[in-house]
Image (cartoon, rainbow, N blue to C red):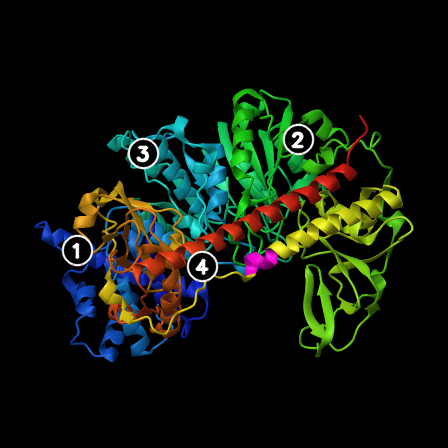
């Protein structure tokens, strides 16, 4: 697991470089070169400490050792000259393995500013080589900054999607494993870790839930570092380990990717990684190499004019995505298995190459399941819609059906930051796939909604072999609906032709709302519409059940071309009920488009909705409006309430250090396994919630506590973030060891009560946020906290203040509950509209 300090070092190194090297990929290359340089010197020192000799910086290359580079007697210019000479010469160093020579091949420094280099090297100097997986996880975090590789159509695969595929494919210790477009080796490392896990004494598969198998960070990027538990593979013999690393292979056409993959595997314990610079599609040099497991997210894009493949492919095509899937399928052993991420074209395109590929996948190559992924899994790099093809040559022969699984939420929102959300279908998808492979049964709780099976005969019947799951879903039977069903086009006039977009640069600020797919985007000087209408997101919206896809616009306003504009026939349907009905639906079956998902006008008009009589509609709307008024009132209370109390000017003002014991913490060394996984909860700033609670922790041991600067903040303390993510604070509901970014305020109970201290801490946190200083990493000193003055009434008055605030908090919580009850009543009322006759 990656600690916040190591993450900070990586972020700081990038921030130092960004002024000279704005390209993230170039930043990663410079950091990689410097890290490997530093680690070679660390290994030399380790060898010398054990009585051996330096291996890397010896003979004519001893002058380039990192230790000599960091000599404070060198001027900035001398350091720059030495560094440039060292990295350009290292590929010719006969004392280093070929792996390291490959890493330094073509290395150069693209700037010549001594000050920037000195700052950068100082940050790199903070890293130390060890033999744990910590450096590997740190390097994966560094690689997570890589985005789209432009015209190649390569996108970094999110770690949780990689882990999901690996869990389904489930490689074993003796399997040969390949990724033919390996990029930075994410699939290969995940497969390696999976094998270590399943060959560890402390691995208990019966205790592991599906949701524990796919680890999620606060964002999709940070998921690479959120490992709940590390396994050491202690059931593997030395021969097993050697064979395992020899059995894992990667190809990539890009020398830059090969270099990064080599470093990544090396830092995960591979002494001689098998990564080859190889054109998988145009060269047949390795065509005869077969593998038990193939995992890949191959490039989606095809160069202009197409690929020029060799002649050994079964499918004659020039599209890279077709050829890669062909390659993978043809290079599996008799019992081989594969997991492949593919663009939607593979799923439904009607060109002969695509149809022939799908036919072969179903009839000859072991396709047994298709997992549809949400359209934004590759955000912020691409909104391209993708699916996962799962192949198992042995298993597929035992069934005449294909399993379709639809993942609508992967645990993260679809914004650029891809932040963690509650909705996550991956655990249920994993459960469905595992159950299917076990006994050809779909778990009842996900059947129909998330997973269903279709016969191969049905898929093949029109010769298209279309793998779009939704087309095979059973059509909803409305024949016994309580109210007649009508298409939206029958009860609404579509006014889309009147819409007009205005670019941001052309907009002139004014008083009229400017609407887009999700609501008001801006205010402009003119308007198009001057009436009450219903807007429904066309693209750039969300179409899940419960999302506010539809909304009402009133008065004078402008609408761009990302929202449909509807004028309901009010003699048939009321605007308010139409909006509620649309927002209660899952509209994704009406969505088309691969790169940009879209609710086009044809599909919009075809949406079927129930149509109660007008007088019934009026009753429903009146009831819903009453519920909504209660919700709005409750929200006002919740959003505007803040704990506050009157400060008597006669109360003495005292320094915090006079009434609290104040101290910071630290982080035990990650390289010492015995310092971790003990029984002491240890926290960092990432576990602080917005409502001043602590959610989650890691565990350290007694030895880890004694051999680090970490200290225990006892139950009842207030803990404030004083470094990096300043401005938050939390109440310690139990004893916690803390890291160096946190400061504990332990109240002297005879003078200040713990809950009063928590209340007054909001003013202290505000001051810390305003006064924090630093370049890159902001914070305040502990002395700053100690000297902060707070009002200190008697303990009796403190208790009265806390009691009053707690009563207010109870009222606020009741408002939250009331709003939730009213929301459920609205949902129940709309469900009645959709109900069926008995």
The range drawn in magenta is 635-639
Say which mark, if any, is on residue 471.
none
Q: What is the distance, in whole Å, between disc 2 and disc 1 at their CAs?
A: 60 Å
Q: Is residue 651 left or right of residue 342?
A: left
Q: Which residue is mark 4?
A: 145
**Residue at mark 2:** 448
Above/below status of 321 relative to 461 = below
Report how far apart the C-alphas of labels 1 and 3 lie in the structure: 27 Å
Q: Position of residue 813 (x, y in %)?
A: 52, 50
Mark sitting earlier along the chain (2/4): 4
Q: Earlier in the sequence, mark 3 or mark 2?
A: 3
On the rendered structure, is 405 left or right of 89? right
Q: Which mark is residue 243?
A: 3
Mark 2 touches mark 4? (CB < 8 Å): no
Name the residue tied to disc 1. Answer: 44
Mark 1 crowd level (few <14, some 14–19, many ≥20, 10 Å Cα):
some
User: Which residue is at a point 18% across and 45% down the rendered structure image?
Assistant: 703
Residue 307: x percent and y percent?
Answer: 60, 51
Q: Is residue 687 above or below residue 762?
A: above
């Amino acid at each position: 697991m990656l600690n916040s300090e190591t993450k900070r070092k990586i972020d700081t190194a990038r921030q130092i470089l960004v002024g000279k090297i704005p390209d993230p990929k170039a930043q990663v290359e410079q950091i990689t070169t410097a890290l490997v340089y530093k680690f070679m010197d660390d290994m030399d020192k380790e060898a010398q400490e054990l009585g051996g000799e330096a291996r890397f910086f010896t003979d004519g290359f001893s002058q380039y050792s990192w230790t000599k580079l960091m000599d404070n007697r060198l001027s900035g210019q001398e350091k720059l000259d030495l560094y440039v000479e060292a990295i350009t010469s290292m590929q010719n160093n006969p004392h280093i393995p070929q792996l390291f020579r490959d890493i330094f091949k073509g290395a150069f420094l693209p700037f010549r500013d001594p000050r920037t280099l000195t700052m950068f090297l100082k940050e790199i100097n903070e890293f130390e080589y060890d033999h744990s997986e910590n450096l590997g996880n740190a390097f994966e975090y560094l690689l997570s900054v890589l985005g789209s590789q432009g015209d190649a159509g390569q996108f970094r695969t999110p770690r949780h999607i990689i882990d999901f595929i690996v869990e389904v494919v489930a490689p074993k210790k003796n399997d040969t494993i390949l990724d033919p477009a390996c990029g930075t080796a994410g699939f290969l490392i995940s497969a390696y870790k999976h094998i270590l896990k399943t060959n560890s004494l402390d691995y208990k598969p019966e205790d592991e839930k599906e949701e524990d198998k796919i680890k999620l960070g606060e964002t999709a990027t940070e998921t690479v570092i959120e490992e709940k538990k590390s396994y050491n593979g202690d059931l593997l013999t030395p021969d097993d380990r050697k064979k395992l690393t020899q059995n894992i292979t990667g190809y990539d056409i890009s020398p830059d990717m090969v270099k990064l993959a080599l470093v990544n595997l090396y830092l995960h314990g591979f002494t001689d990684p098998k990564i080859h610079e190889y054109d998988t599609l145009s060269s047949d040099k390795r065509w005869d190499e077969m593998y038990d497991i193939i995992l890949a997210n191959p490039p989606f894009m095809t160069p202009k004019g197409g690929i020029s493949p060799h002649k050994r492919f079964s499918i004659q095509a020039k599209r890279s995505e077709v050829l890669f899937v062909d390659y993978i399928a043809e290079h599996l052993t008799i019992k081989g298995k594969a997991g492949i991420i593919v663009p939607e074209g593979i799923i439904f395109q009607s060109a002969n190459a695509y149809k022939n590929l799908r036919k072969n996948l179903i009839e000859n190559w072991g396709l047994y399941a298709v997992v549809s992924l949400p359209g934004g899994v590759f955000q912020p790099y691409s909104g391209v819609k993708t699916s996962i093809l799962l192949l198992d040559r042995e298993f597929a022969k035992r069934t005449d059906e294909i399993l379709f699984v639809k993942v609508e939420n992967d645990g993260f929102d679809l914004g650029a930051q891809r932040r963690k959300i509650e909705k996550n279908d991956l655990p249920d998808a994993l459960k469905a796939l595992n159950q299917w492979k076990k006994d050809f049964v779909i778990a009842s709780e996900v059947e129909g909604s998330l997973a269903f099976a279709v016969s191969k005969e049905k898929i093949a019947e029109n010769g298209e072999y279309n793998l779009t799951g939704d087309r095979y879903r059973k059509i909803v039977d409305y024949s016994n609906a309580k109210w007649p069903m009508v298409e939206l086009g029958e009860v609404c006039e579509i006014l889309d032709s009147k819409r007009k977009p205005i670019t941001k640069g052309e907009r002139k600020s004014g008083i009229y709302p400017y609407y887009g797919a999700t609501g008001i985007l801006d205010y402009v000087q003119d308007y198009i519409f001057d009436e009450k209408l219903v807007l429904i997101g066309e693209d750039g919206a969300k179409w899940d059940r419960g999302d506010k896809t539809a909304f009402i616009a009133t008065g004078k306003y402008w609408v761009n071309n990302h929202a449909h504009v509807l004028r309901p026939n009010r003699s048939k349907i009321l605007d308010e009920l139409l909006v509620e009905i649309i927002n209660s639906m899952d509209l994704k079956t009406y969505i088309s488009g691969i790169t940009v998902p879209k609710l086009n006008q044809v599909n919009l008009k075809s949406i079927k909705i129930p149509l109660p009589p007008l007088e019934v509609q009026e009753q429903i709307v009146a009831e819903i409006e009453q519920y909504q008024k209660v919700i709005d009132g409750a929200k006002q209370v919740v959003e505007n309430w803040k704990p506050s109390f009157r400060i008597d000017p006669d109360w003495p003002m005292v320094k915090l250090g006079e009434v609290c014991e104040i101290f910071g913490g630290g982080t035990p060394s990650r390289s010492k396994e015995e310092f971790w996984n003990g029984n002491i909860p240890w926290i960092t700033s990432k576990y602080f919630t917005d409502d001043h609670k602590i959610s989650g922790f890691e565990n350290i041991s007694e030895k880890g506590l004694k051999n680090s600067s970490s200290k225990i903040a006892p139950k009842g303390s207030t803990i404030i973030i004083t470094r990096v993510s300043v401005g938050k604070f939390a109440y310690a509901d139990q004893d916690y060891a803390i890291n160096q970014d946190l400061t504990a305020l332990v109240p002297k109970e005879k003078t200040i009560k713990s809950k009063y201290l928590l209340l007054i801490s909001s003013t202290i946190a505000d001051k810390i946020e305003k006064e924090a200083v630093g370049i890159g990493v902001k914070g305040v000193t502990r002395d700053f906290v100690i000297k902060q003055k707070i009002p200190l009434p008697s303990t009796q008055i403190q208790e009265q203040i806390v009691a009053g605030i707690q009563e207010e908090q109870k009222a606020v919580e009741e408002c939250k509950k009331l709003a939730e009850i009213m929301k459920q009543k609205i949902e129940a009322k709309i469900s009645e509209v959709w109900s069926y006759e008995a």
